[in-house]
């Protein structure tokens, strides 16, 4: 008698994925046309007196500059939050300390 091998779900899904991939690849290969790529047209010449190509116009920021500005303001806000949190915590502690001293001293108002 021949021995029957039990296939796990993982192996069955692997085979199913491979079969789907194998059927999708020929379709992708067949859809490639033999046409040649078009050459991009040269960009129009900038008007005289403007900034050179590749640099932003005066007053505009590049993406890197905007990102750096966001990071800087985010860091400043975070630092302000931490500072104010420390001040609130310190004022709570001093208030507790003063109230505790008031309770411990008899007759003090």
Image (cartoon, grey):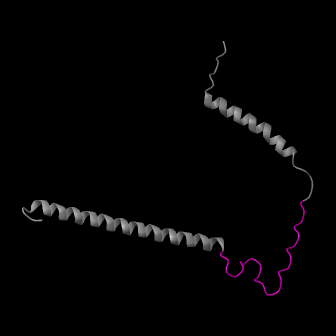
Of 66 and 53, nearer the camera is 66
Q: Give coordinates of residue 37: x percent, y percent.
A: 89, 60
In screen coordinates, is 64 left or right of 94? right
Whether 47 is among the magenta residues is: yes
Q: Give coordinates of residue 15: x percent, y percent.
A: 69, 32
The residue shown at (57%, 72%) is: 68
Q: Give coordinates of residue 2: x percent, y percent.
A: 67, 15
Instruction: Relative to 50, say whether 79 is above or below.
Output: above
Instruction: Relative to 2, say whether 46 is above or below.
Output: below
Whether 33 is among the magenta residues is: no
Q: Quadrant of the N terminus?
A: top right
In screen coordinates, is 4 left or right of 108? right
In screen coordinates, is 98 left or right of 43? left
Determine the residue located farthest toward the bottom in the rendered image.
49
Range shown magenta: 37-61
Of 61 and 39, nearer the camera is 61
The quarter of the displayed image where residue 67 is located? bottom right
């Amino acid at each position: 008698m021949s021995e029957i091998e039990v296939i796990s779900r993982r192996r069955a899904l692997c085979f199913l994925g491979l079969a789907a991939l194998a059927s999708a690849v020929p379709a992708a290969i067949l859809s490639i046309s033999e046409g040649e790529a078009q050459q991009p047209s040269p960009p129009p010449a900038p008007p005289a007196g403007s900034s050179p190509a590749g640099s932003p116009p005066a007053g505009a920021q590049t993406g890197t500059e905007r990102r750096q500005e966001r990071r800087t303001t985010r860091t400043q806000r975070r630092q302000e939050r931490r500072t104010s949190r420390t001040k609130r915590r310190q004022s709570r502690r001093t208030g507790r300390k003063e109230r505790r001293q008031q309770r411990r001293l008899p007759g003090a108002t």
